[in-house]
């Protein structure tokens, strides 16, 4: 059974006939900021990341949001390391691979853009500059346009990263310029110090501001991961969990693995009568080609 939402409730409907689609769970396995000091279970090498991707998929993830690290464990946007990691993930699961073009805050645009040339199924496209803790995550409009054009050239579906509300208007500007195709898929990242605070009211406000027909995922940072994920489940959105955003299972208790965080949100989804998307469901919901292309 799926839920049907009443008309005019201000909540995004997804799927046919107002029924909620299965929930697409994205696993953000490592990110650029999370260190082993914060959680010793963070996967770093390509084989570790591929094993974590496999386990996350078994637990219910259908999208892998991918950052990679160099041999010393530092964030890198190296095309070669992405290619190696994607190949290892492909051997082990059929999830949609979504590469990061955000990288780390100190990286230059050309460096960040490298994995897009591998023609992955998806890549992130952050639509605005934001304070990021003590740093600045720099995304001026010309950079956003350059990244969107590269994604179009390589046939990559963007996921619009929203750290603050102005990013939605910027995404609409990209639609107007013909640089991205509507309807878009958004990731609402909430709780980064300097970005949109992670409150239910802000989530509702962001969802209400999305262009008609959009799909959306919520990525709550730190302790906000679970409550915002549960809200997204009942609002008809999708959910991102994983060590990139949160290293805890509960207050003061480190998560054992990314899969543990995926399994919990999948379990809650089923309790709420929200089926968990398979990779094939995710490709339909996120408007990706049904058959994935091998990377060049
Ligand atoms: N590491 C953050 C500065 C993305 O993946 O596109 C940016 C980030 C967003 O993680
Ligand atoms: Zn990321």
Image (spheres, rainbow, N blue to C red):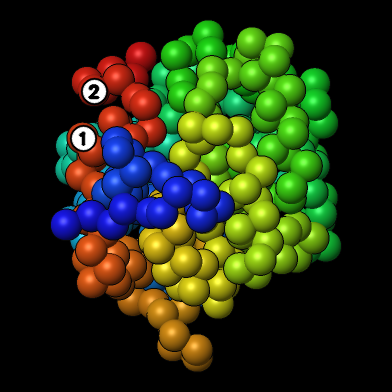
- Nearer the observer, 130 or 49: 130
Please tell me which residue lies in front, 215 or 7.
7
The residue at the far bottom in this view is: 252
Secondary structure under badge 1? helix
Q: Please give left or right for residue 154 compared with residue 56 in the image.
A: right
Compared with 153, 293 (above or below) is below
Is tag 2's residue or tag 1's residue first in the polypeptide sequence? 1
Residue at image position (30%, 47%) is: 19
Q: Farthest residue to the front: give it.
A: 7
Please report the residue visible at 66 percent of the width from the left and 66 percent of the height from the top: 201
Residue drawn 80% across the image and 26% down it = 141
Q: Does the residue labelled 2 lie within 8 Å of ligand 1?
A: no
Dot 2: few (<14), some (14–19), or many (≥20) neighbours within 10 Å?
few
Q: Quadrant of residue 155?
A: top left
Q: Which mark is residue 280?
A: 1
Q: Residue 134 carries which label?
A: none
Image quarter where the C terminus lies is top left
**How many other residues sit within 10 Å of disc 1, few (<14), some (14-19) or many (≥20)?**
some
Task: Please provide percent x and percent y for residue 38.
Answer: 54, 75
> Residue 12, how many percent across, how many down?
48, 47
Q: Nearer the viewer, residue 12 or 145?
A: 12
| Residue behind label 1 places its C-beta within 8 angstroms of ligand 2 | no
Distance CA(mark 2)–CA(mark 1): 7 Å
Tell me if I can see residue 3 in this picture. yes
Q: Mark 2 points at which residue?
A: 290
Q: Are the residues tagged 2 and 1 within 8 Å (C-beta)?
A: yes
């Amino acid at each position: 059974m799926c839920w049907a939402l009443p008309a005019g409730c201000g909540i995004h409907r997804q799927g046919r006939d107002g029924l909620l689609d299965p929930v697409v769970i994205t696993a953000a396995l490592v990110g650029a900021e999370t260190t082993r000091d914060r959680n010793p279970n963070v996967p770093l090498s390509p084989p570790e990341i591929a094993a974590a991707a496999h386990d996350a998929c078994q637990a219910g993830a259908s999208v892998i949001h991918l950052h990679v690290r160099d041999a010393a464990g530092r964030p890198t946007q190296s095309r070669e390391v992405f290619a190696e990691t994607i190949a290892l993930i492909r051997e082990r699961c059929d999830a949609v691979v979504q590469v990061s073009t955000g990288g780390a805050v100190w990286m230059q645009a050309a460096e960040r853009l490298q994995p897009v040339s591998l023609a992955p199924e998806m890549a992130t496209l952050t639509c605005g500059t934001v304070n990021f803790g003590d740093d600045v995550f720099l995304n001026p409009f010309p950079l956003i346009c350059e990244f969107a054009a590269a994604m179009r050239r390589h046939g990559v579906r963007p996921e619009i990263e929203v750290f603050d509300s102005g990013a939605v208007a910027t995404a609409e500007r990209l639609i107007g310029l013909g640089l991205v195709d509507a309807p878009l898929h958004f990731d609402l990242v909430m709780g980064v110090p300097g970005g949109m605070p992670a409150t239910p009211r802000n989530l509702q406000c962001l969802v209400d501001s999305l262009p008609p027909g959009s799909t959306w995922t919520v990525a709550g940072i730190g302790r906000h991961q679970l409550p915002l994920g549960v809200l997204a489940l009942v609002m008809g959105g999708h959910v991102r969990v994983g060590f990139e955003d949160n290293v805890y299972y509960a207050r003061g208790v480190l998560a054992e693995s990314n899969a543990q965080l995926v399994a919990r949100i999948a379990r809650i989804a089923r309790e709420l009568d929200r089926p968990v998307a398979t990779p094939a469901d995710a490709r339909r919901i996120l408007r990706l080609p049904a058959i994935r292309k091998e990377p060049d």
